[in-house]
C-alpha cells in the first residue's frame, strides 16, 4: 500500500487500475478489504483508490477525537494529494457519511462526479440497530467510552459478534478476508478508535444527509442490515431515501458483491445515457 501524511499522521491507501477515479471508503471497524470484489472489478476500467481510514488497518491510530469532520478533512487531503478530478465516491456507513459531507462542502468545480452512499450512518440509523445501546452509552459517558475501548475482547466473542452483526451468511465471504476483519476487533487501539467514534456520534447529525449535495447521489441499503437497519434508512429525509435495496447485511459488498457492483455500475450507465 501507498500512504500520505494527513495532519501529522500516515494514512495508507490501495491504488489499482487506470481511468476515471473511484474512491472506496469503508465503515468503522474494518479496512479497505471490504471492497476487495469491487476493487478487482472496477480496476479493469477505472483508477481505483481505497484508503484505510485514519484509525484502521494500515493507517495510524492517533489519540484524537474521531468525528465526521476529521474524516471529511482526511478525504479532502487524499483527493488533493492525488489531484483527483471527476471522482466517484463510494462509501459504506462512516464512509457514506464522509462522502456525502465532503460532496456537500463545495470541494471545488469538477472534483466530485457522483456519490454512491451505502447504509448511511447517522445518530438515528445507528441508534435503531444492534449496536445502538453501546453507541448510546459511549455518547452519554466519556468515562464509559474510554473503559469500553480498553477492554480486552476474547477471540471467540469478537468473532461471533462481528459475524452476527455484519452478515446474514458469513459462509459467502472469502475466508481470508473474514479472518482478517474478525481479528481487527481484538486490537485495543482499534477499539479505542471505535469508542471515540461512538462518543462523537453527534458529529454525524443530519436529518437528510443528501439534501445539500449538488452532484448525483445514489443511496443503497442492505435489506438485512442489523447495524443500520433498512427501516431506519427509510426514516431519513426525502433526498436520502434508499434508492436501491440489495440483499445481505452491513457488509453486503463482501456478502453480495455482484449486487453492489451492479448498483454502482448503474450510475455509470445512467451517466452515459444522459450524455447521448
Image (cartoon, rainbow, N blue to C red):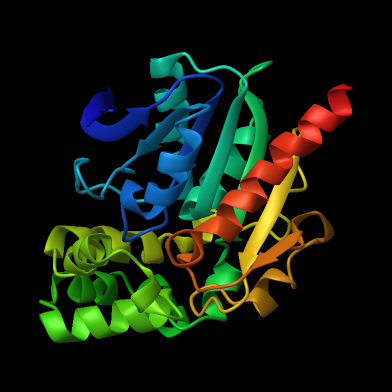
Is residue 209 visible in the rendered structure shown here?
Answer: no
- Asked if 46 appears above or below 72 in the picture, the reply is above
User: From the viewer's perspective, is 56 left or right of 133?
Assistant: left
* Quarter of the C terminus within the rendering: top right
Residue closer to the observer: 215 or 272 = 272
Is residue 90 visible in the rendered structure shown here?
Answer: yes
* Quarter of the N terminus within the rendering: top left
- Asked if 178 appears above or below 141 in the picture, the reply is above
User: From the viewer's perspective, is 189 left or right of 256?
Assistant: left
Which residue is located at x 72 percent, y 45 percent? 266
Percent position of residue 194, x then y: 30, 63
Percent position of residue 221, x then y: 63, 65
- Asked if 16 appears above or below 224 in the picture, the reply is above
Residue closer to the observer: 139 or 120 = 120
- Asked if 262 appears above or below 160 in the picture, the reply is above
Asked where in the image residue 106 lies, by quadrant, the reply is: top right
Asked where in the image residue 149 lies, by quadrant, the reply is: bottom left
Percent position of residue 220, x then y: 66, 58
Which residue is located at x 48 percent, y 49 percent? 95
Task: Give the total of numbered labels.
Answer: 0
User: From the viewer's perspective, is 243 left or right of 273?
Assistant: left
Asked where in the image residue 258 lies, by quadrant, the reply is: bottom right
Which residue is located at x 68 percent, y 79 percent? 231
Residue closer to the observer: 124 or 117 = 117
Which residue is located at x 15 percent, y 58 percent? 189
Amino acid at each position: 500500500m501507498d500512504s500520505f501524511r494527513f495532519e501529522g499522521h500516515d494514512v495508507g491507501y490501495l491504488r489499482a487500475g487506470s481511468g476515471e477515479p473511484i474512491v472506496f471508503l469503508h465503515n468503522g471497524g474494518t479496512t479497505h478489504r471490504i471492497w476487495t470484489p469491487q476493487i478487482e472489478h472496477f480496476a479493469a476500467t477505472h483508477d481505483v483508490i481505497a484508503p484505510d481510514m485514519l484509525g484502521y488497518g494500515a493507517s495510524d491510530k492517533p489519540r484524537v477525537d474521531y468525528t465526521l469532520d476529521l474524516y471529511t478533512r482526511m478525504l479532502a487531503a487524499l483527493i488533493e494529494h492525488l489531484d483527483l478530478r471527476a471522482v466517484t465516491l463510494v462509501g459504506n456507513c462512516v464512509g457514506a457519511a464522509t462522502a456525502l459531507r465532503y460532496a456537500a462542502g463545495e470541494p471545488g468545480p469538477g472534483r466530485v462526479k457522483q456519490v454512491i452512499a451505502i447504509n448511511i450512518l447517522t445518530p438515528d440509523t445507528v441508534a435503531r440497530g444492534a449496536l445502538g445501546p453501546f453507541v448510546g452509552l459511549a455518547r452519554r459517558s466519556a468515562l464509559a467510552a474510554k473503559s469500553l475501548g480498553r477492554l480486552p475482547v476474547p477471540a471467540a466473542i469478537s468473532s461471533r459478534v462481528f459475524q452476527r452483526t455484519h452478515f446474514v451468511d458469513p459462509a459467502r465471504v472469502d475466508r481470508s478476508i473474514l479472518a482478517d476483519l474478525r481479528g481487527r476487533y481484538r486490537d485495543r487501539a482499534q477499539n479505542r478508535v471505535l469508542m471515540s467514534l461512538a462518543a462523537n456520534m453527534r458529529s454525524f447529525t443530519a436529518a437528510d444527509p443528501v439534501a445539500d449535495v449538488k452532484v448525483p447521489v445514489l443511496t443503497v441499503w442492505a435489506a438485512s442490515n442489523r447495524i443500520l437497519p433498512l427501516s431506519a434508512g427509510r426514516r431519513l429525509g426525502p433526498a436520502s431515501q434508499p434508492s436501491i435495496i440489495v440483499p445481505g447485511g452491513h457488509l453486503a459488498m463482501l456478502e453480495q458483491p455482484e449486487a453492489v457492483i451492479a448498483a454502482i455500475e448503474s450510475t455509470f450507465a445512467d451517466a452515459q445515457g444522459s450524455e447521448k
